[in-house]
């Protein structure tokens, strides 16, 4: 997160922590896309095979040669069976039946016919297996094998992704914290506490491994246990390396309070849980056992990695700037442009899975475009922090999919149906407060002056729409695959790479804004996006995995049994709202959803809260929590992409309390008002309980 370049001389260790880990992550993500796409491709291959070769479904496997005798001596067999039948009868038989020679002959004749037919079928199928069939079915089997392997090894892949990317974030000093490292004291305090946290996990992991492998019970997932022990040790080594190195460019002065703010959030959480398991429970393997619950939903967190890569790829395109350029000729007041930004950014938020991802990917563009028209810094920061909040209820958001997986009482179609309405309400409330807090009259450019350049800028978006349409058409025709909540993680990286290729190879339009972070070549853009994605994947997954320890503990740290004491639905909903916001203040979104599903949702349902109403309220409240101090994750991500300097300048602006703290107050007003309406509005009409 630091804006200060931490220069170090080239070393073997730095080479290992730069190129090799990033290459591993790239290969892993590409393999996941290939393997998951292979599921659809495999289905299409079988259909094509059937159209090319009759009985291809039978030709997909080698037809074994029958072992039956197709020329038996039926007379001899009849005599043998008759002798055996007579020998088996005795004087104690209650029902004596004589050997039916004619019926037995018919049965033997039928068996002979079936045997001859089986030989004929085997010979027919074997004759149809040409070299072309062998090559084709080999290719088909490889796709099937890759898909099955990817599905079976998801947990192990997540272990690799977590610790490799986590070591990169550690080496780059880019973990998620309240403030970046700016002084030598910050560096020492942050690194020492990271070392203690990582060492706590490593000691627990090796103890867990020793206990597990010394047991007489067969270990079902040894690769996960070994990976956890080795991966946590790698984090320890990365922290040790950071401790002994001496970064240049840091301030010599610092305070302990400021230094503590530079400690990654996952470090504090890990140390708290280490104290609980080591000191209170006195169970050394406990920390690793609870931590390993993170791998139970491996597919979901692998999707997070793919979404983050999509976000970093999107950052290498001009798409965000060109969308905003449509509105630039109208010379919208800052408040109206902020409203437009919240609405526009809802779509990529829905497709990249979480508000944190879109802030990391597009936050710089949003902030820059707002500042270009003179938007005050506090409002620009507030809008950037909120840019991903409204879109989490829209299709095909990953968070909603997780809710439907963990809760059988709701389905994604119903959640997305009401999510659209909650989205409309949120942006409407934002528009209201934006107008209420405006500092200048709302004036826009004349239609005669703005319409023509706006349409011209809109035309510049047509090639992008064409690229997306062509790629999605290819998916539909060749793979029978369409963009939804399940296919989005694997389709988005491919679609955005196509956009990057179009911009670098075919587009003649000049960039609207020169971004030093944007590379000029396809190779450079892919390399840069992969480096950025590796860092952000490591930082975000380490935070997510640490928070998932709460779920591993069975959610015992969050108790909602008190909800049963409330006599009215209004009181129950009020308590739920407060509980959701508190969870959102301190817990990352996916861990929060897991905790709510496990510990709160069942009790709320018993109290008569409608499940759809429950989860719409929960999502809005969690987003409000992410925008609320003392943690305010959305603001932390905003500070990370905007930079410490802009945030410090914003703190010096404003002529009264509201405008000096607008970056916090505006999001809280918007989400707070929306939350009250979503939580209690349906109850007034008797449809929420």
Image (cartoon, rainbow, N blue to C red):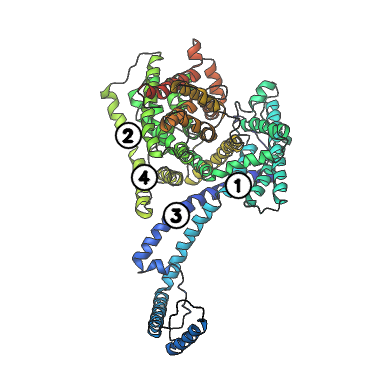
- Kindly state the secondary structure of the residue where label 1 is placed: helix
Which residue is tagged 3? 39
Which residue is tagged 1? 160
Distance in Å between CA atoms under marks 2 and 3 = 37 Å
Please report whichever mark, 1 or 2, sits nearer to the chain's N-terminal start: 1
**Camera-side mark, 2 or 3:** 3
Residue 614, how many percent across, how many down? 44, 30
Callout 4: few (<14), some (14-19), or many (20+) C-alpha neighbours within 10 Å? some
- Kindly state the secondary structure of the residue where label 4 is placed: helix
Please report whichever mark, 3 or 1, sits nearer to the chain's N-terminal start: 3
Which residue is tagged 2? 458
Please report whichever mark, 4 or 3, sits nearer to the chain's N-terminal start: 3
Distance in Å between CA atoms under marks 1 and 2 = 43 Å
**Camera-side mark, 3 or 1:** 3
Locate the C terminus by quadrant.
top left
Please report whichever mark, 2 or 3, sits nearer to the chain's N-terminal start: 3
Please report whichever mark, 1 or 4, sits nearer to the chain's N-terminal start: 1
Q: Which mark is residue 467?
A: 4
Locate the N terminus by quadrant.
top right
Residue 282, how many percent across, how many down? 73, 35
Callout 3: few (<14), some (14-19), or many (20+) C-alpha neighbours within 10 Å? some
Callout 1: few (<14), some (14-19), or many (20+) C-alpha neighbours within 10 Å? many
Distance in Å between CA atoms under marks 3 and 1 = 23 Å
Toward the top, the furthest residue is 656
Residue at the image point whose x is 39% and y is 27% from the top: 688
Q: Report which quarter residue 678 is drawn in.
A: top left
Callout 2: few (<14), some (14-19), or many (20+) C-alpha neighbours within 10 Å? some
Toward the left, the furthest residue is 448
The reply to whether callout 3 and callout 1 are in contact (CB within 8 Å) is: no
């Amino acid at each position: 997160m630091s804006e200060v370049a931490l220069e170090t001389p080239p070393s073997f260790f730095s080479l290992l922590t730069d190129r090799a880990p990033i290459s591993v992550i790239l290969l892993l993500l590409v393999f996941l896309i290939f393997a998951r796409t292979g599921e659809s491709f495999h289905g299409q291959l079988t259909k094509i095979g059937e159209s090319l070769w009759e009985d291809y479904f039978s030709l997909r496997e080698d037809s074994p040669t029958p072992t039956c005798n197709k020329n038996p001596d039926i007379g001899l067999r009849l005599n043998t069976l008759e002798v055996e039948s007579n020998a088996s009868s005795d004087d104690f038989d209650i029902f004596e039946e004589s050997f039916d020679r004619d019926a037995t002959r018919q049965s033997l004749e039928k068996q002979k016919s079936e045997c001859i037919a089986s030989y004929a079928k085997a010979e027919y199928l074997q004759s149809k297996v040409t070299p072309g069939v062998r090559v084709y079915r080999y290719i088909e089997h490889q796709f099937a094998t890759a898909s099955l392997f990817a599905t079976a090894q998801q947990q192990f892949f997540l272990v690799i992704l977590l610790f490799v990317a986590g070591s990169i974030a550690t080496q780059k000093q880019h973990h998620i914290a309240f403030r970046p490292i700016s002084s030598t004291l910050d560096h020492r305090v942050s690194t020492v506490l990271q070392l203690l946290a990582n060492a706590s996990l490593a000691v627990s992991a090796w103890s867990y491994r020793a206990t597990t492998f010394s047991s007489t019970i067969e270990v079902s997932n040894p690769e996960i246990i070994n990976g956890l022990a080795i991966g946590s040790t790698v984090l320890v080594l990365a922290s040790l390396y950071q401790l002994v190195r001496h970064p240049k460019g840091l301030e010599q002065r610092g305070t302990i309070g400021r230094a503590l703010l530079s400690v990654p959030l996952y470090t504090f959480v890990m140390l708290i849980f280490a104290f609980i398991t080591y000191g209170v429970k006195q169970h050394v393997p406990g920390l690793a056992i609870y931590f390993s619950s993170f791998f139970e939903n491996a597919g979901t967190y692998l999707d997070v990695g793919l979404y983050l890569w999509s976000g970093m790829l999107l950052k290498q395109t001009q798409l965000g700037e060109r969308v905003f350029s449509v509105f630039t000729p109208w010379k919208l007041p800052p408040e109206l442009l902020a409203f437009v930004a919240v609405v526009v950014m809802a779509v990529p938020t829905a497709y990249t899975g979480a508000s944190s991802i879109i802030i990391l990917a597009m936050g710089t563009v949003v902030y820059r475009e707002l500042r270009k028209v003179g938007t005050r810094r506090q409002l620009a920061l507030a809008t950037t922090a909120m840019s991903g909040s409204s879109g989490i209820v829209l299709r095909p958001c990953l968070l909603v999919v997780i809710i439907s997986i963990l809760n059988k009482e709701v389905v994604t179609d119903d959640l997305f149906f009401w999510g659209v309405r909650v989205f409309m309400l949120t942006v409407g409330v934002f528009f209201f407060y934006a107008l209420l807090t405006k500092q200048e009259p709302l004036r826009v450019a004349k239609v005669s002056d703005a319409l023509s350049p706006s349409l011209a800028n809109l035309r510049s978006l047509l090639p992008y729409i064409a690229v997306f349409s062509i790629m999605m058409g290819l998916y539909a025709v060749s793979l029978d695959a369409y963009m939804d909540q399940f296919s989005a993680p694997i389709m988005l990286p491919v679609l955005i790479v196509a956009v990057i290729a179009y911009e670098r190879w075919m587009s003649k339009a000049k960039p609207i804004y020169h971004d030093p972070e944007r590379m000029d070549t396809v190779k450079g853009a892919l390399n840069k996006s992969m480096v950025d994605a590796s860092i952000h994947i490591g930082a975000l997954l380490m935070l997510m995995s640490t928070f998932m320890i709460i779920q591993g503990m069975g959610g015992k740290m969050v108790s909602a049994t008190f909800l049963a004491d409330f006599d009215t639905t209004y009181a129950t909903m009020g308590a739920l709202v407060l509980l959701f916001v508190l969870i959102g203040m301190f817990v990352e979104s996916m861990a929060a959803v897991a905790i709510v599903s496990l510990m709160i949702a069942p009790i709320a349902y018993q109290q008569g809260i409608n499940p759809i109403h429950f989860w719409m309220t929960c999502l809005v409240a969690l987003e409000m929590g992410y925008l609320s101090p003392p943690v305010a994750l959305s603001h932390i991500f905003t500070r990370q992409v905007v930079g410490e300097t802009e945030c410090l300048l914003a703190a010096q602006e404003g002529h009264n309390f509201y405008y000096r703290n607008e970056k916090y107050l505006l999001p809280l007003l918007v989400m707070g008002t929306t939350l009250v309406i979503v939580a209690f509005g349906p109850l007034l009409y008797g449809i929420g309980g």
